[in-house]
Image: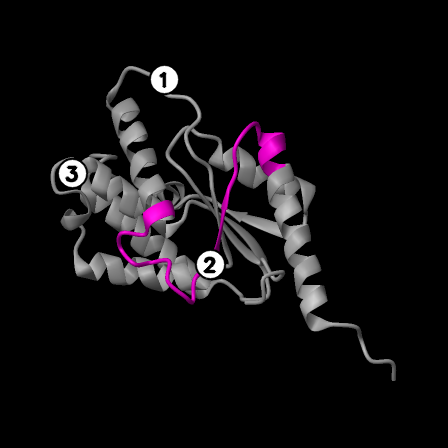
Amino acid sequence: MPPGSLMWIAIAGTHRNGKTTLAEAIAQARPDFEVVPEPYEQLLEQGEDFLDHYAPETFIRQLEHQVSCLSRCARGDKIVFDRSPLDFLAYLAASDGTAGWESIGLDVLEVAAVGMQYLDLIAWVPLSEKRGHDHGRSLRRLTDDRLRDLVISDPLGLLSAPKPDLLELRGSTAERLAGLFQYQDRALLEESQQAGPSTPP
């Protein structure tokens, strides 16, 4: 996709970090964008039940569902996805503190790689607050660390071309929203400049 054609955007980040709020804010500011809820919520609505929210098979099931959803969406639609394939890889590595990336099977990586190629932009929302006192807090922090590693170091080789654009968004929801729209405006300007002046008929 050309850099200005940011039609499919995935919000990446650990849980309780404002991803859903940001996705909804995007759709409110730009009504031509549709929000696709995170796979966990979609699967629950479809009747699936997960005995352990943090089990590896739960994350793999969500990854598979998201990639299936991506493959069925209409290419011309403007869509914001709550979560990205990177999220589930980060959760898998974080839930296995010893093996890390080595705990992720090749078949899972292949599914994630397919999903990545559908996306035009991954908007990464890093963790800004580390609070709470349950298992979710530890996993939340570890997942954020793993996501940071994926985005910055690309240890799994998922960000080599062709790839979606990557954008880090920090601050309040309003600041994140402004950062995203500024990025889109710059991308559209660059695309226009690359195309050059139009030729009169």
Whether the magenta-drawn stretch holds residue 52 is answered as: no
Instruction: Name the element at disc 1.
Output: loop
The magenta region covers 152-177
The tag earlier along the polypeptide, 3 or 1, is 3
Q: Mark 1: which amino acid?
A: Arg
Can you tell which mark lies on residue 96?
A: 3
The mark closer to the camera, 3 or 2, is: 2
Q: Which residue is mark 1?
A: 131
Instruction: Name the element at disc 2.
Output: loop
Q: Residue at x 36, y 17 (%)?
A: 131
* Residue 1 visible in the shown view: yes
Label 1: few (<14), some or many (≥20) within 10 Å?
A: few
Q: Give the Cα separation between the discs numbered 3 and 1.
A: 21 Å
Q: Give the Cα separation between the discs numbered 3 and 2.
A: 27 Å
The tag earlier along the polypeptide, 3 or 2, is 3
Q: Mark 2: which amino acid?
A: Pro
Q: Name the colouring of the figure.
A: one colour
* Residue 47 visible in the shown view: no
Quadrant housing residue 172? top right
Q: Which residue is mark 2?
A: 164
Q: Residue at x 18, y 51 (%)?
A: 104
Q: Give the Cα separation between the discs numbered 2 and 1.
A: 31 Å
Quadrant housing residue 176? top right
- In the rendered image, the residue lying farthest to the right is 201
Q: Mark 3: which amino acid?
A: Asp
Comparing 5 with 197, the one in front is 197
Label 2: few (<14), some or many (≥20) within 10 Å?
A: many
Q: Left or right? Give the position of 130 relative to 75.
A: left
> Does residue 184 lie above or below 200 as drawn?
above
**Quadrant (top left/top right/bottom left/bottom right) for the C terminus:** bottom right
Q: Position of residue 27 (x, y in %)?
A: 62, 44
**Quadrant (top left/top right/bottom left/bottom right) for the N terminus:** bottom right
